[in-house]
Image (cartoon, rainbow, N blue to C red):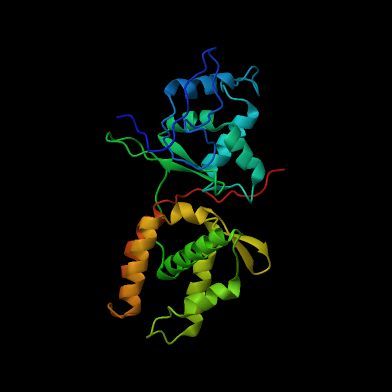
Amino acid sequence: MNPTATGTADTGTATDGTANNGTATDGTAGGRTPSGSTASTGTARDAAAAELLTEPLFEGDEGLLPAEVRGTLVRVLATRFVDGVRNPSLWNRVLRHEQVLRSRLHDIYLDLVIDRRRQVAFTVQLELDDEVPVLLRKEKPLTLAAAVLLLHLRQEYDRGAVEGHDVVVEHLELLDHLEVWKDVDDQNPASFRKRCEAAITTVREKGILVPVSDGRYRVSGVIHALMTAEKVDAMTAAFEELAAGATDGGAEDDEAADTEAADTDDADDTQDEGQDDDA
């Protein structure tokens, strides 16, 4: 089976035999390029061939890619998300070498998703009919507090997008938002606060909350990759049910919310955040 996802297709190889610049067939270069873009195999291979190494980088080097492309590939593999706002240098390299990166990722059953409008890129596991080795291991489901926080941040991000500005949130503001979800039978405020702090840490480590100053975070466009419209709808319905008291007890509430949050966390893997700016 040839694994491809819907999206704009790259044009084919130019008549003179050189690879094109990867412009979409609709004439736009922006928007989201799903992993498994319908770019022709010839285009990807031509792009890879154009970037072949002319001299080895070290003694006994059997690699074919230049140092910059190798370094970018390593960063893409080691990073949950490439945030173009936080790390413009890495983002520009991903765009510059998009086709050869996608080609190399296909070799290990991964693909590259690029959201140009939100300046986010990340890898995903290809889903094939045949059994193939899985490189990206899924993590455990989110806690109730972390799931509530993700939904809140997605809503805040959308509001900022409509108004045309970045969203910056306060640490204390996030704690206040989580306070309304405190279990009615929780008589230990200290333990509740600890769970809320852990939720904020979890979301920050996923690259969604980017520190801008002490106690303040920018909400990254990464939130859109994790929280799709379908997941937002499902989680909203689950939380509305919890708020209405349709479930009993904090433990059961956590279990119900975790069921919805599990799919959200599937977009993540065990890679390190790796979003530090390059030198």
In front of the other: 107 or 159: 159
User: Where's residue 92, x and y in %?
Assistant: 63, 39
In this rendering, the answer to whether 14 lies above or below 259 is above
Q: Residue at x 54, y 19 (%)?
A: 49
Q: Quadrant of residue 40?
A: top left
Residue 253 seen in the current view: no
Residue lying at the far front in this picture: please name it: 27
Say which quadrant the C terminus sits in: top right
Residue 232 seen in the current view: yes
Q: Quadrant of residue 201?
A: bottom right
Residue lying at the far bottom in this picture: please name it: 187
In this rendering, the answer to whether 5 lies above or below 85 is above
User: Where's residue 61, x and y in %?
Assistant: 60, 21
In front of the other: 20 or 140: 20
In front of the other: 170 or 276: 170
Q: Quadrant of residue 249?
A: bottom left
User: Where's residue 73, x and y in %?
Assistant: 56, 35
In this rendering, the answer to whether 163 lies above or below 184 is above
Q: Residue at x 59, y 71 (%)?
A: 171
Residue lying at the far top in this picture: please name it: 16
Q: Residue at x 44, y 40 (%)?
A: 34
Say which quadrant the N terminus sits in: top left
